[in-house]
Image: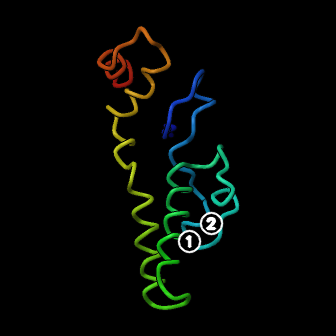
Amino acid sequence: MSEFYAHTAPGETANWELLFTGGCAALEGGECEACERLDPKHGHLNKVAWWSAKFCERMFPSGSPEATAARRWGYLTGLWHDFGKFALECRCDLTSKLDAHRTKSQAVRWRSG
């Protein structure tokens, strides 16, 4: 399976933030310690979704149907905010940053075979 990245960082891809981490407890509506502490090895979308859900939920009285709905919508919004980064062109744009001499179009050709 391919690895997808959210943000670039200086150096090799080992220093980059992963875009998504499967198996996150927050995907099932649970609490996620890695999301809460903004673990750099945990998926970017996971963390944004988790925090967005918490923020949205707090706009309404605790335990209310509105708070529950807001939490769910906030979570979905957080997951989708960088959805385009799964696209080949975006991944190539990010990976081209590893080599300052490689253009975006060269990276697309390189990644697509």
- Which residue is pictured at 37% across the width and 49% down the height? 83
Q: Nearer the viewer, residue 15 or 51?
A: 51
| Image side of residue 36 versus residue 75, left or right | right
Q: Position of residue 46 (x, y in %)?
A: 54, 56
Q: Which residue is mark 1?
A: 28
The CA span between labels 2 and 1 is 6 Å
Q: Position of residue 18 (x, y in %)?
A: 55, 42
Q: Position of residue 89 (x, y in %)?
A: 32, 31
Disc 1 residue type? Answer: Glu
Q: Is residue 31 above or below residue 16?
A: below
Q: Position of residue 44 (x, y in %)?
A: 53, 49
Q: Nearer the viewer, residue 23 or 71?
A: 71
Q: Which residue is mark 2?
A: 25
Residue at the far left in the pictured view = 105
- Contact (CB < 8 A) between labels 2 and 1? yes
- Which quadrant, please, contains the C terminus? top left
- Which residue is pictured at 40% across the width and 72% down the height? 73
Disc 2 residue type? Answer: Ala
Q: For residue 14, what is the image quadrant? A: top right
Q: For residue 24, what is the image quadrant? A: bottom right
